[in-house]
Image: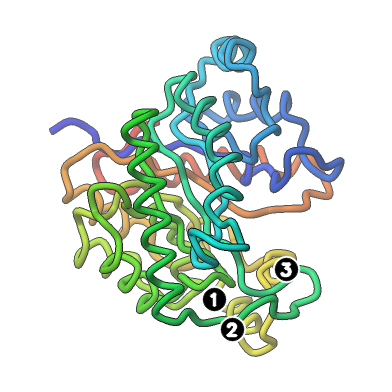
Amino acid sequence: MAKNITIGTAPDSWGVWFANDEKQTPWQRFLDEVAEAGYKTIELGPYGYLPTDPSRLADELAQRGLNVCAGTVFTAFHRGIEGSANAWEDAWEPARKVAELTAAIGGEHIVVIPAMWRDDVTGQAVESGTLDAAAWASLAAGHDRLGRILQEEYGLKQQFHSHADSHVCGQPDIEKFLSVTDPQYTTLCLDTGHAEYGGASSVDLIRKYPERIGYLHLKQVDPQVLERVRAEDMTWAAANLAGVMCEPPAGLPDLNEVIEEIEKLDRPVFGIVEQDMYPVADFSVPLPIATRTRQYLLSCGSRTRV
């Protein structure tokens, strides 16, 4: 059978969370080191980190033998599709820019990350940590609308990314999200690290909802650090600084088991390495980790490739 899992990477694995930040690996170095590590496929990362002119970006990628599989956007559709929150308008304008760039350079997917319910710096709640029926309805309607437009106007697939400190984090939340959204327009970017962080089982989700798994972020959590995160009720940013995401295969879940389950789907899937490392104090740190991680993942299952 043909190999069906393409292993790629993302700016996140080089400590990139923002379009501009002096604590982040410069974009030219990121692209150079991605190629040096042996990857051929990347995500765009935050809009504006890589060049946003399609011609220039295509040239930079071609010089290094790289291609783009996805862009990333952030949304807060649970706050209402209509009304004062303007949740749709707030999401659509940045999403449109990302979609245009992603489509122009041959990408296939848009990874969509929901808003967090508490401030990442202060830890103070900015809203309730749970959603009522109206908020769930708005969340579902917003993602289905976004997915339909991305698909019909840009030829892109929406991949919803459950996330730490968001309303869709644990397994019951993920399963409810799947139950209220249209599978034609909304599938999962199954982030194995964030799923583990929220107490969800990646393998169980793949087995129960094989048709809803459209994309992967491959990462692991350090179980000892996660225990501390839960005990101290750390924010996502604090957990990241504490080292909750670790280099495979030192953490959980077992990525070999995850990849074996994905292979059973027998269809093409991108598996993007996304080890959260912001901020990187030493720019020499990411490359060896990225190289070892690629080698490890290619040893998993039987049908992985770069």
Q: Tag 1: residue type?
A: Pro
Q: Which mark is residue 31?
A: none
Q: Which residue is mark 3?
A: 120
Quadrant in the picture for residue 21: top right
In the rendered structure, which disc, 1 or 3, sits on the residue that comes first in sequence?
Answer: 3
Q: Which residue is mark 2?
A: 227
Q: Residue at image x 51%, y 26%? A: 100
Query: Disc 2 to disc 1, how far (Cα)?
Result: 6 Å
Q: Position of residue 231 (x, y in %)?
A: 64, 90
Which secondary structure lies at badge 2? helix
Tell me: residue 124, above or below residue 217. below
Callout 2, which amino acid? Answer: Glu
Q: Is residue 46 left or right of residue 121?
A: left
Dividing the image into 4 quarters, which one contains the C terminus? top left
Pick the residue in front: 261 or 43.
Answer: 43
Q: Quadrant of residue 212?
A: bottom left
Residue 184 in picture, x, y percent from top left: 23, 48
**Residue contact at pointers 1 and 3, CB within 8 angstroms:** no
* Dot 3 crowding, Cα within 10 Å, few <14, some 14–19, many 20+: some
From the top left corner, tell me how far across and down residue 175 is, in percent: 31, 72
Q: CA distance from mark 1 to mark 3?
A: 21 Å
The reply to whether dot 2 and dot 1 touch (C-beta < 8 Å) is: yes
220 shown above or below 242: above
Q: Residue at 40% of width from left, 54% of height from top?
A: 143
Q: How many marks?
A: 3
Measure the alpha-carbon separation of dots 2 and 3: 19 Å
Residue 223, numbered circle: 1
Which of pointers 2 and 3 indicates the residue nearer the eye? 3
